[in-house]
Image: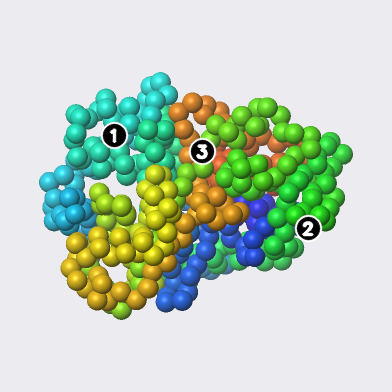
């Protein structure tokens, strides 16, 4: 998304960018499945009524639908393997802990340490709230910086509403890509950079000269060292890449013949599948796992994950979970070779890593959600904004 956004801005200003895409499709962590109605295997929600994504949506006249958490579609909870009532006594306590958990101000400590200060040991509402925050960040609460979470919440200007695209989220990258030169199946293995320009080497051995290179590979790819640099990146840049974390995130989609579940917006569970919501345009439930839960889900594999999910849903909703089941699919983003994770998060001790990662180097520029420094990390609009930022940097440098 960052690369497409940067290329569109450059092209609109008279430049001639070339997008090199390692995989056989555009969109990165946006992937829409249409086998049984539209289901998002990756990014699904537009987070906020003021997110940068709206600029693209309005230009392309793409339709959206609000996804509200209200009395009509309440947030529900499963605890101890049983679906709790809408007026569950712990529900308000959980929400209060979530709000307080995102308001830390003090030394850089983990989310786990912060919750030890604000909640009595063994408080189930606090545990569920802590784990929900960490899961959203695709992180372990023992590693996630409470200070960074609070700072990112404070910096966020996009808003907190959620919207979805009934026609499929992949219309966003398709819109950004219109008119841009794109080469698919073109993984980059090396970038030689200097003040006079750069040379990009592809896995095929082909070399491409460039006036500038914008690197939008995921943090996971950068940390794995799949792209070499000549000369090597400065120590400060390498430290920034190493200090951040690529959080694991996975989705498990289950399709059914009919909707048999009670109304809910989000379902939080203390099970192996800790989060569920309803698909937008399909009779399907979407299970989400972030952080350690996603690692465990990937290790199970698709077949075992589906079986565990059906058992957990049967315990909550009865035998119709199995009787009405059609098929399932596991989207394990940490195993995707050109992604290697869900999205970035800030661990304890990362300091100014995002700012350092975003800083340009001569003819080498950096974009992507991991470079977001305005609180929009881990989001599509954060990636788009980073593409716009780096396009302006490139144009300024070239002129």
Point out the tag, 3 or 1, that comes first from the N-terminus: 1
Quadrant in which the N terminus appears:
bottom right
Name the side, left or right, on which 35 lies relative to 360. left
Q: Residues within 10 Å of mark 1 (few under 14, many from 20)?
A: some
Residue 274: image location, x then y, percent? 31, 52
Return the mark for residue 204. 2
Question: Which residue appears farthest toward the bottom when viewing the image?
Answer: 257
Return the mark for residue 52. none
- At horizontal 61% and vertical 46% (from top left) the residue drawn is 221
Tell me the CA gap for discs 2 and 3: 30 Å
Of discs 3 and 1, which sits in the foreground?
3
Which residue is tagged 3?
245
CB within 8 Å, label 3 to label 1: no
Q: Residues within 10 Å of mark 2 (few under 14, many from 20)?
A: few
Point out the tag, 1 or 2, that comes first from the N-terminus: 1
CB within 8 Å, label 2 to label 3: no
CB within 8 Å, label 1 to label 2: no
Point out the tag, 2 or 3, that comes first from the N-terminus: 2
Q: Is residue 138 above or below residue 285?
A: above
Q: Residue 294: in sight, yes or no?
A: no
- At horizontal 12% and vertical 46% (from top left) the residue drawn is 89
- Quick one: SS at disc 2? loop
Question: Which residue appears farthest toward the right when viewing the image?
Answer: 196
- Quick one: SS at disc 3? strand
- Quick one: SS at disc 1? helix
Residue 80: image location, x then y, percent? 17, 50
Residue 129: image location, x then y, percent? 27, 41
Q: Is residue 353 above or below residue 158?
A: above
Return the mark for residue 100. 1
Q: Nearer the viewer, residue 308 or 186?
A: 308
């Amino acid at each position: 998304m960052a690369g497409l956004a940067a290329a569109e801005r450059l092209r609109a200003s008279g430049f001639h960018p070339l997008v090199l895409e390692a995989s056989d499709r555009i969109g990165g962590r946006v992937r829409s499945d249409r086998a049984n109605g539209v289901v998002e295997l990756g990014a699904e929600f537009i987070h906020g009524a003021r997110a940068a994504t709206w600029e693209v949506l309005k230009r392309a006249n793409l339709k959206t639908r609000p996804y509200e958490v209200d009395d009509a579609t309440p947030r529900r909870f499963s605890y101890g393997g049983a679906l709790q009532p809408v007026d569950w006594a712990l529900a308000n306590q959980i929400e209060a802990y979530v709000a307080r958990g995102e308001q830390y101000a003090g030394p850089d400590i983990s989310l786990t340490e912060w919750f030890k200060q604000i909640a009595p040991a063994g408080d189930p509402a606090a545990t569920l709230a802590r784990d929900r925050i960490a899961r959203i960040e695709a992180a372990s609460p023992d590693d996630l910086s409470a200070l960074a979470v609070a700072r990112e919440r404070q910096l966020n200007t996009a808003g907190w509403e959620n919207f979805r695209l009934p026609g499929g989220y992949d219309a966003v990258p398709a819109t950004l890509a219109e008119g841009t030169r794109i080469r698919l199946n073109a993984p980059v293995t090396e970038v030689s950079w200097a003040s006079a320009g750069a040379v990009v080497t592809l896995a095929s051995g082909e070399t491409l000269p460039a006036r500038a290179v914008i690197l939008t590979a995921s943090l996971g790819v950068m940390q794995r060292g799949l792209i070499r640099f000549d000369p090597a990146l400065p120590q400060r840049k390498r430290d920034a890449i190493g200090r951040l974390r690529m959080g694991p995130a996975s989705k498990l989609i289950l399709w059914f013949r009919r909707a048999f579940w009670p109304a809910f917006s989000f379902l939080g569970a203390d099970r192996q599948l800790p989060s569920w919501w309803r698909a937008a345009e399909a009779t399907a439930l979407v299970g989400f796992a972030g952080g350690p839960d996603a690692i465990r889900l990937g290790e199970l594999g698709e077949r075992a994950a589906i079986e565990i999910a059906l058992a957990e849903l049967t315990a909550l909703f009865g035998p119709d979970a199995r009787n009405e089941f059609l098929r399932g699919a596991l989207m394990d983003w940490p195993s995707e070779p050109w992604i290697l994770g869900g999205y970035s998060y800030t661990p304890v001790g990362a300091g100014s890593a995002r700012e350092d990662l975003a800083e340009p180097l001569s003819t080498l520029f950096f974009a992507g959600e991991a470079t977001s420094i305005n609180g929009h990390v881990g989001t599509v609009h954060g990636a788009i904004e980073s593409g716009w930022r780096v396009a302006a940097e490139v144009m300024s440098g070239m002129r």
